[in-house]
Image (cartoon, grey):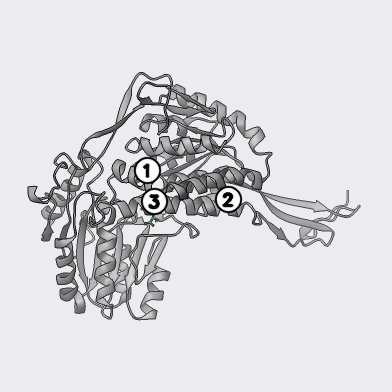
Amino acid sequence: MTDQPTDGTYGHYIDGEWTDGSGDTTFESENPATGESLATFERGTEDDIDVALAAADEAFEEWRELSYIDRAEYLWDIYHELRDRTEELAEVITKECGKEISEGRADVIEAYHMVEWAAGNARHPHGDVVPSEVGAKDAYMRRKPRGVIGCITPWNFPVAIPFWHMAIALVEGNTVVWKPAEQTPWCGQIIAEMMEDAGVPDGVFNMIQGFGDAGASIVDDSRVDTVLFTGSAEVGHEIAGKVGGEPGKLAACEMGGKNGIVITENADLDIAVHSAVMSSFKTTGQRCVSSERLIVHEDVYDEFKDRYVELAESVAVGDPLDENTFMGPAIEPGHVEKIHKHNELAKKEGAEVLVDRAELEASEIPDGHEDGHWVGPFVYEIEYDSDLRCIKEECFGPHVALMQYSGDIEDAVKIHNDTPYGLAGAIISEDYRQINYFRDHAELGLAYANLPCIGAEVQLPFGGVKKSGNGYPSAREAIEAVTERTAWTLNNSKEIEMAQGLSADI
Ligand code: UN1
């Protein structure tokens, strides 16, 4: 990080200046694998958000007048910086959010893919030429920026997700006020430094460190035209509810999931076991697309169970900076508690526990990491019953239910769909009819066949249905949330001729 004028406490980036802001409280970024403090940050207030929004509002007038291609130029600088600094940034991500190092790398790579998509898209068509019923009329759909975009992002993808929101918002001609997650302010600091180094004009990009109260000040302010939120369902629904009541304002929220994988009677079990372990335990189960439900046909249930349990017993939990680690720690002590509570709930509801590594053995914890927030795989089997809470409520951890089904793909998909969420899911099958049935009937935004249900690419839509989302604040679809569509119609004649045969006689 560069030196900041704050004597060891990193501040906010508002209107092209680094500032301590108006608050008198600071907070620490902590390494979840060791418990050690990484750096200290100013905690932003409503007043800081107010100053940032005023700057963003003012900067919008000039920024919107630049061409798409000129705006994209700033992002190309950031693209190159992200590429050149991938290793360094991956390490920061891993230190700050505990994901193992290959995941840290993938986070940076996903970020520059998004920047590449958004900046490259500046040279692509941005509207439609549409036929008119009237020969002398030209009709088009044109896009224009909405204005000030408030971005609120989560800790689990602290570099990629901010760019999902901001790369598209900026290229489309909007200005941005961003609050990074309070668990990953260091990543926030670095991204703000990149924006500064790229010369993004003052006020066009603003970053305020802080907590939910700062986020709420963004959501509540009438100068914000769109709120882009990725995070928990609880907060997302609150935001969607508030913003929904304000005419003209939009919220696109992408939230959690209780994602399921269906493994049919003819599945390739190598692919099934591999996909399920990746989906349940990568990122310690803390992706919104992580899978907590495995719905397995009775004919292959026992074999799948034995092989899955064996692998879940052996995945390496440990120092996320070690290339051999599969799973790092959970993000914070409160989250470890929450995961344990979900495990307890499953037991109370009659789960048969198959793997219980929730409390790691002292010998499993690497030296110097005793204060890390450790939690390991917890796997159970349970008979499907729609009233069970453990198979419906998101844990956001390495907590997995195995359920057996009999019958056809229709029966599996019924169980699959019996959750309030609808984000990601997968089918493992060798039968294309089953695969296509799942694709068309599973209620979700991201559907995979013979793959894990994690690892989406930015050029696809990313978002969910039901409780998992409203709108797509992410990947290529964010463009819909940050632009207005104008139906633009032009008469080439000296006469007025109306569509629908409407008489123009007066
Ligand atoms: C998240 O789960 O919070 O699809 C985001 C994936 C990543 C993004 C995940 N590209 O797994």
The residue singled out by tag 3 in the image is 107
Pick the residue in front: 21 or 317.
317
**Residue located 11% across and 50% down the image:** 360
Work out whether 72 lies above or below 438: above
Q: What is the three-letter code of the residue carrying label 1?
A: Pro
- Where residue 184 sits: x, y (%)? 34, 38
Q: Is residue 279 left or right of residue 110?
A: left
Q: Residue at x 51, y 37 (%)?
A: 195
Q: Name the one closer to the observer, 360 or 323.
A: 323
Residue type marked 3: Asp
State the residue in front, 307 or 317: 317
**Crowd around label 1: few <14 · some 14–19 · many ≥20 (10 Å):** some
Q: Which mark is residue 119?
A: 2
Q: Position of residue 81 (x, y in %)?
A: 49, 45
Query: Looking at the image, which residue is at 17% across and 56% down?
Result: 377
Kindly tell me whether mark 2's CB lies below 8 Å from ligand 1.
no
Q: Which one is closest to the eye, mark 1 or mark 3?
A: 3
The residue indicated by pointer 1 is 154
Alpha carbon separation for disc pair 1 and 3: 13 Å
The earlier-in-sequence mark between 1 and 3 is: 3
Badge 2: few (under 14), some or many (20 or more) residues near its Cα, within 10 Å?
Answer: many
Residue type, label 2: Ala
Q: Is mark 1 within 8 Å of ligand 1?
A: yes
The label nearer to you, 2 versus 1, is 2
Give residue 453's quadrant in the image.
Answer: bottom left
Picture layout, residue 150 above or below residue 357: above
Identify the image quadrant of the N terminus: top left
Q: Is residue 157 visible?
A: no
Label 1's element? loop
Residue 422 showing in the rendered view: yes
